[in-house]
Amino acid sequence: MSKVYFQELSFLKALLASLKYSQLFVLVDENSKENCYPLIGEYLSDHQIIEIVSGERHKTLDSCSMIWNALTNATADRQALLLNLGGGVITDMGGFCAGTYKRGIRFINIPTTLLSQVDASVGAKTGIDFNGYKNHIGLFCEAEAVLVNPKFHETLPRNQLVSGYAEMLKHGLIADRKHWQDCLNNGFENFSNELIQHSVKIKEKVVDADPTEKGIRKILNFGHTIGHAIETHLLNTEKALLHGEAIGLGMIAEAFISKSKGLLNSEQYSTITQELQKIYQSSKIEKASYPEIIRLCKQDKKNSNGQISMSLLNGIGEAVYDIQVEEELIEHALNELL
Ligand SMILES: NC(=O)c1ccc[n+]([C@@H]2O[C@H](COP(=O)([O-])OP(=O)(O)OC[C@H]3O[C@@H](n4cnc5c(N)ncnc54)[C@H](O)[C@@H]3O)[C@@H](O)[C@H]2O)c1
Ligand SMILES: [Zn+2]
């Protein structure tokens, strides 16, 4: 697993000095360029900036072509280093482009959203969306290092903090009841490095046990079968949700399925949904969208033999995976979101 550093940003200077590279490239979007690049500029050696347009709708092959073109035009060789400075879109796509350029160059992640700090930038999953399907094309590819610092939160819009908070709550729900409670006590502002660090630790432990998601790593996908389907369904519409906002809804729906399967008792289910519904409410789902959401669930990467398969909760702080879920039950679960 990549080494994750919870250090001052000045640590970057020593980190770069410890890596021998031929050229340094810094991948940004317009927001990370404006808000985050000035915070690290003084710690960088000579480099070239590669800028892409922000947002999930640009996590595409076209943006990858732009990045590969920039590397090619600069005659980057296999000793080049790519520094991904931004949210999960940048770390996912930058990692994918680095992992495939000339069969792989090294990359460092400096995640600048809460979501990318606690989730996207660690764990070696990289990729892009394709033909409207989320993260459809990608690689398992480790960052050389990840540098996490909450200073970047100062310029983050509130909804981005709410989005990242969903993944922290998820880490608590699937593996650590105390973390769930600590996150609820903290709320979604003023995250300490310790809370972020603990969330990353939970993810690391699961990933270390199963790096390529053959088994236990699937529990990290709790809330994501329905959450991704909702996110994809609303993408490019005026009702579009941030990733974590969609996962918040996905967790409510999948907690319902967990209860229906007898995995969660009613009390646990009420506690979870009451807390999640305080933050993640939606009037964005309509009955007319159910067939499309279910169709998208069928594309989920965890499915096998044409059956929809989910990671569910069997307690607060415990999860199970590879549970087959009938379409009718998904419809009932979506009713919880109306
Ligand atoms: N690889 C994984 O394991 C994994 C896990 C979870 C999520 N993801 C992916 O991560 C992506 C979502 O990541 P995200 O929520 O970080 O989205 P994002 O990268 O789109 O960033 C959100 C927005 O915040 C802006 N931004 C970034 N840092 C900022 C800062 N410090 N100040 C002001 N604005 C800033 C960005 O430009 C963007 O507009 C999704 O594509 C999702 O699939 C991947
Ligand atoms: Zn997620």
Image (tube, rainbow, N blue to C red):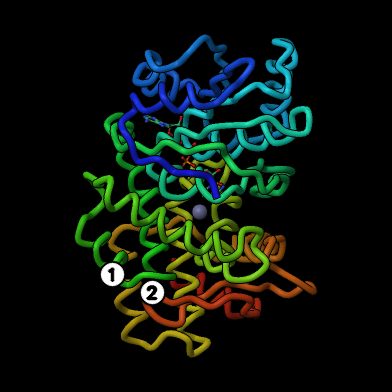
Q: Is residue 267 above or below residue 190?
A: below
- Residue at the disc numbered 1: 178
- Amino acid type shown at disc 1: Lys
Which picture quadrant has residue 169? bottom left
Give the alpha-carbon distance from disc 2 to disc 1, as whole Å.
8 Å
Q: Is residue 115 above or below residue 288?
A: above
Residue in view at x 57 percent, y 39 percent = 143
Say which of 84 and 56 sits in front: 84
Give percent across and percent down for residue 325. 63, 79
Mark 2 and mark 1 in contact? Answer it, CB < 8 Å: yes
Question: Which of the marked residues, 2 or 1, is nearer the chain's N terminus?
Answer: 1
Give percent across and percent down for residue 172. 37, 66
- Residue at the disc numbered 2: 317
Looking at the image, residue 267 sits to the left or right of residue 5; the answer is left
- Amino acid type shown at disc 2: Gly
Does the Cβ of the disc 2 residue fall within 8 Å of ligand 2?
no
Q: Is residue 233 above or below residue 261?
A: above
Give percent across and percent down for residue 283. 41, 58
> Which image quarter holds the C terminus?
bottom left
Residue in view at x 40 percent, y 40 percent = 5
Mark 1 is surrounded, within 10 Å at the Cα level, by few (under 14), some (14 to 19) or many (20 or more) other residues, namely few
Looking at the image, residue 192 sits to the left or right of residue 299; the answer is left
